[in-house]
Image (tube, helix red, strand yellow):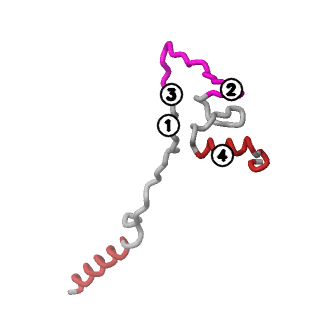
Amino acid sequence: MTRAIALAAIAIGMTAAGCGGDSSGETTAPAVSIPAVTAPAISTPTQAGTTTAPARTITKGGGTYNPSAPDSATNDVPPPAGSPQDAFEKQCEKNPQACG
């Protein structure tokens, strides 16, 4: 019986010595590198032999404008006849102080 107790004590001692000493039970996340995110460049296709048309200007009512360009202080595109914008511009011509 002392032999069985001795073997049990040795087995318990070996088991106790093996517990808590190694890190095999611990989990760690691997190092991950994340590449930088960049937006793709927007490229415009080019075609050989393409030409741009010259700016078309129209002279009307004493002013010159380009109907293809946006309406601005330097490119006063007239509004469609009979539109609210046309009525506003006519009112401003009659009474410039009201449109200041």
Residue shown at the point (35%, 76%) measured from the top left: 16
Which mark sits nearer the N-terminus, 4 or 2?
2
Residue 14: % across, % down: 33, 73
Residue 74 location (% of width, % of height): 71, 32
Give the spatial CA distance, label 4 vs label 1: 45 Å
The amino acid type of the residue labelled 2 equals Thr
> Which label lies toward us, 4 or 1?
4
Of residues 10 and 48, the one drawn nearer to the viewer in this rendering = 48
User: What residue do we see at 49% from left, 48% from top?
Assistant: 34
Q: Which residues are magenta?
A: 45-66
Tags 4 and 2 touching, CB below 8 Å: no
Q: Which mark is residue 44?
A: 3
Q: Which residue was labeled with disc 4?
A: 88
What secondary structure is found at the residue carrying circle 3? loop
Q: Residue at x 72, y 44 (%)?
A: 92
Closer mark to the observer between disc 1 and disc 3: 3
Residue labelled with disc 2: 64
Q: Residues within 10 Å of mark 1 (few under 14, many from 20)?
A: few
Residue 94 found in image quarter? top right
Q: Quadrant of residue 21?
A: bottom left
Cβ–Cβ under 8 Å for marks 1 and 3? no
The answer to whether marks 4 and 1 mark residues whose Cβ atoms lie closer than 8 Å is: no
| Relative height, residue 46 to residue 39 (above, below) | above
